[in-house]
Image (tube, helix red, strand yellow):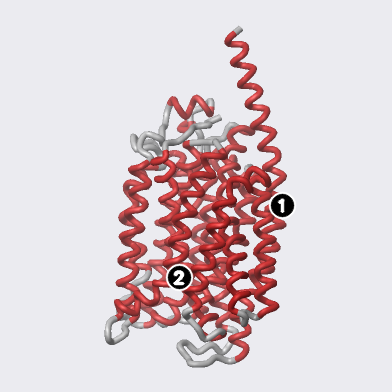
Amino acid sequence: MINKKLPLKVKFALGVSNWANNLLILLNTYFLLYFYTDVVGISGGTAGVIMLIARVWDAVNDPMMGVIVDKTRSKEGKCRFWLKYFSVPAAVILFLSYFCPAVSTRGKVAWVAVTYILQGMASTVLSVSANALTARVTDDPDERVLIQQISSLGDIALSLTIPSITLPLATVFAGKDQNMVTGFAGVIAVYSVIYGILRLMSWKGTEGYDTDGSENEKHIGKKQSSQSISSLIRQTAGNHYALLASLSYIFYLLISAIMGSTMVYYFKYNLQNTDLLSVYSVTVMVGNVIGILTMKPMHKRLGNAGSCVFCGAVCVAGCIIRWITMDQNFVIFVAAMIILGFGSGMVGSYSIQCILDSCTYARLKDGADNQGTTMAVFTFSQKLGQALGGVVAGWMLELVPYVANAQTQEQSVLNLFFAENIILPMILAGCLAVGFLFVSRYEKKLKELIKSRKAEEQEERSCQKA
């Protein structure tokens, strides 16, 4: 067992890396489809195809990166090496993916396709490395919860600011001629610098904690470098705990992506009040804060998977309230958003805890030391869920007579935006709760393994003393 107590600076550094990841997720969730359709000028269907192609490539790229991380040998550590040398290139790629030169329509489609795929690859390198690093440094569930709480605090700040200030800032950068290509380039340039700095802070703050060689071998009992690629893949494929948790997590990402991709449309056309984006951000933040304050006791009471089940049910309740009231009562709208903020925010937090638990489960059960490949599965599910949500939103947009930037839209268009913001999330939240109900079975097995291993270690110490 690697029950290390970590200094606050290390926990902070690990949490900061998640801030960078969430910054990217929020941008893609709320503004990528809007940027492609209303700013660059390509169709929603074309954007959906590009996203789907990128995810097909991720099916190869993500496991490949997981194996590379597991096989990496460097004085910086197998995970920190990638954080050090790839943070700046990834920040540049982020900027390029929200910028488009003045070229023909075909040229724009090509630019969007290349930069979006590169963005996904860069995200894979850093996310797999950062998540695997957390799994490597400690097995202590309380330490991991504290890391997640730090991460969630940053996520709250980002969730409050990114949806509400991005479009206003883009308008400022757009200048008098209201060139939104220039506007988005300006605001994303700022975000890209922040993204790169956060990733580098994670690298610097974890110095000395991503160790190879003898320290790791003490806990695993065999050299990672001797493992073949096929062995790493087999271990990951056999970790049903991680696979099921990642599959269940996709439902959460679908909710986030579908709602996020269409929320600007929903507030603009259905409610005719884009100022509600700020209200949404604040109320979701309130729900997130409540979740963070209750995270540790909920973890103690329900476990990580059980907490996901509970929070999924909370999301269903919030959607039902919105469906009944049609978001016409402001007070009830605020209350429903707080409920959804609590449920969705905590599902995201506890999901990563389930994946980290699956790494511990694989090591205790099979002696596996494959955090990189396991986290690659999680990263792939994360991007797959985001992209599928965008694909669904983009393709559905092609099924209705949507007119970009029109003052009013057909009723069928308004019905679609309503379904994508309330009805579909409700159904997906129910699926999420059921999925994590099955994950909880593996969590029970993990607790039994931990109890058994501690008993063995205690017996070994007793024999040594004798």
Q: Position of residue 385 (x, y in %)?
A: 56, 62
Q: Position of residue 319 (x, y in %)?
A: 66, 70
Q: Position of residue 466 (x, y in %)?
A: 61, 7
Q: Nearer the viewer, residue 445 or 286?
A: 286
Of the 4 image quadrants, the one containing the N terminus is top right
Mark 1 crowdedness (10 Å alpha carbons): few <14, some 14-19, many ≥20 = some
257 to the left or right of 442: left
Name the residue located 49 percent from the left edge and 75 percent from the top edge. Answer: 277
Q: Which mark is residue 163?
A: 2
SS type, badge 1: helix
Name the residue located 56 percent from the left edge and 67 percent from the top edge. Answer: 388
Q: How many marks?
A: 2
Q: Quadrant of residue 424?
A: bottom right
Are discs 2 and 1 less than 8 Å apart at CB? no
Q: Residue furthest front?
A: 331
Name the residue located 42 percent from the left edge and 67 percent from the top edge. Answer: 162
The amino acid beneath tag 1 is Leu
Q: Residue furthest top?
A: 466
Q: Which mark is residue 437?
A: 1
Q: Nearer the viewer, residue 440 or 11?
A: 11
Measured Cα–Cα span from mark 2 to mark 1: 32 Å
Note whether 63 is above or below 32 in the view shown: above
The amino acid beneath tag 2 is Pro
Q: Earlier in the sequence, mark 2 or mark 1?
A: 2
Q: Position of residue 333 (x, y in %)?
A: 60, 75
